[in-house]
Amino acid sequence: MITGGTGFIGRHLINALGENVIEVHRGQPSGSIHNNIVKVESITGKTDYKSEYFNEVDCVIHLAAIAHSSSDEMHSVNCEGAAKLAKAAAVNGVRRFIFISSIGVNGACNSEPFKSSDAVKPEPMYAMSKYNAEIELKKIAEQSAIEVVIIRPPLVYGKHATGNFAKLIKLANSNLPLPLGAIHNKRSFVAVDNLVSLIKTCISHPKAANKTFLVSDDDIVSTSEFLLKLIKANNKATKLIPLPVGLLIFLSKIVGKQDQVTKFTNSLTVDIEYTKSTLNWVPPLSLDEGVRRCFK
């Protein structure tokens, strides 16, 4: 069973899993590859789930979430909604619940790669709502037979991705000189196909039960390097001008874009050695191949 199947990650995951999937959402999805649909009015702490929804369901993968909303609404959907679904799954004998969280639970930036064992520092409110959901899900796992698996990805990229990656694509496609050539930070990204690969592994791997995993590509690059890869893969002629980061941030304050520029210039890296060693898993795609698939 999958929530958020009409979203960017959800579409890729459903295509990878095939027809043996039940989708939970608020309406008929366009282009669905099967007819196993559970319709609900919303996915919040007030949602009612019928027992028959979980007939023959072995694993629930919870992708549905909202961002850029009020803290109350994010808590209702991202935290209470996840907990309500997990409780219903546990009561109805589902073996495993996979929750897609966020690397923001660890923090917004770092100087050393985040590990799953690190103390958390959820930023911003979206990440806080995800962390609160993690806490509730762990309680449910302790009080029932259901196994909870938590996955925290950084920025997920791929064809038809939205959010911050869509902004990077727009910049890369501008064909205008951009003052982003001197950003020498360190960033971890994850190709959607690599994330899907890890989710598929966690559906049945015995060592995944009640664990928290970080996920990313094996490559670490700067924002400037990542942009150059996007430009090259899409055969664009966009030029990156090496404007000093301090001056870039100063100018961004003047035009009211400081938050966006700070996200692009900060470092945020992920250590996935625990994920690899525990699950005997490696990201199947290199960053270059992941970028190439964005335009394939």
Image (tube, helix red, strand yellow):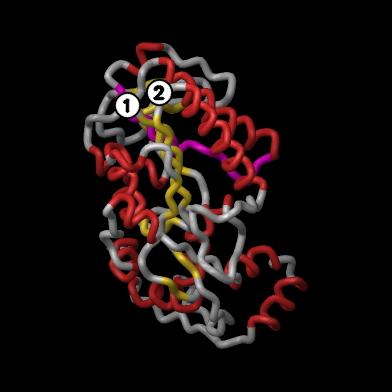
Q: Residue most toward the top?
A: 51
SS of the residue under disc 1: loop
Upstream in the sequence, badge 2 or badge 1? 1
Crowd band around label 1 with a 10 angstrom C-alpha radius: few (<14), some (14–19), many (20+): many
**Quadrant position of the C terminus in the picture:** bottom left
Q: Position of residue 177 (x, y in %)?
A: 53, 82
> In this picture, which residue range is highlighted in magenta?
57-70
Crowd band around label 2 with a 10 angstrom C-alpha radius: few (<14), some (14–19), many (20+): some
Q: Report the side of 155 relative to 70 (left or right).
A: left
Is residue 68 one of those drawn in magenta?
yes
Answer above or below: position of 48 versus 15.
Answer: above
Tell me whether the residue at label 2 lies in contact with that at label 1, contact meaning CB atoms closer than 8 angstroms: no
**Residue 134 seen in render:** yes
Answer above or below: position of 227 versus 156.
Answer: below
Q: Name the quadrant containing residue 55.
A: top left
Q: Report the side of 263 relative to 221 (left or right).
A: right
Q: Report the side of 276 relative to 72 (left or right).
A: left
Q: Nearer the viewer, mark 2 or mark 1?
A: 2
Q: Position of residue 90 (x, y in %)?
A: 42, 21
User: Residue visible at 59% across and 67% down?
Assistant: 110
Q: Position of residue 26 (x, y in %)?
A: 47, 26
Disc 1 target residue: 22
Whole-Å distance between the Cαs marked 2 and 1? 22 Å
User: Residue visible at 32% across and 26% down?
Assistant: 22
Q: Name the quadrant containing residue 100.
A: top left
What secondary structure predominates along the stretch shown in magenta?
loop
Disc 2 target residue: 145
**Residue 178 seen in render:** no
Q: Report the side of 256 relative to 82 (left or right).
A: right
SS of the residue under disc 2: loop
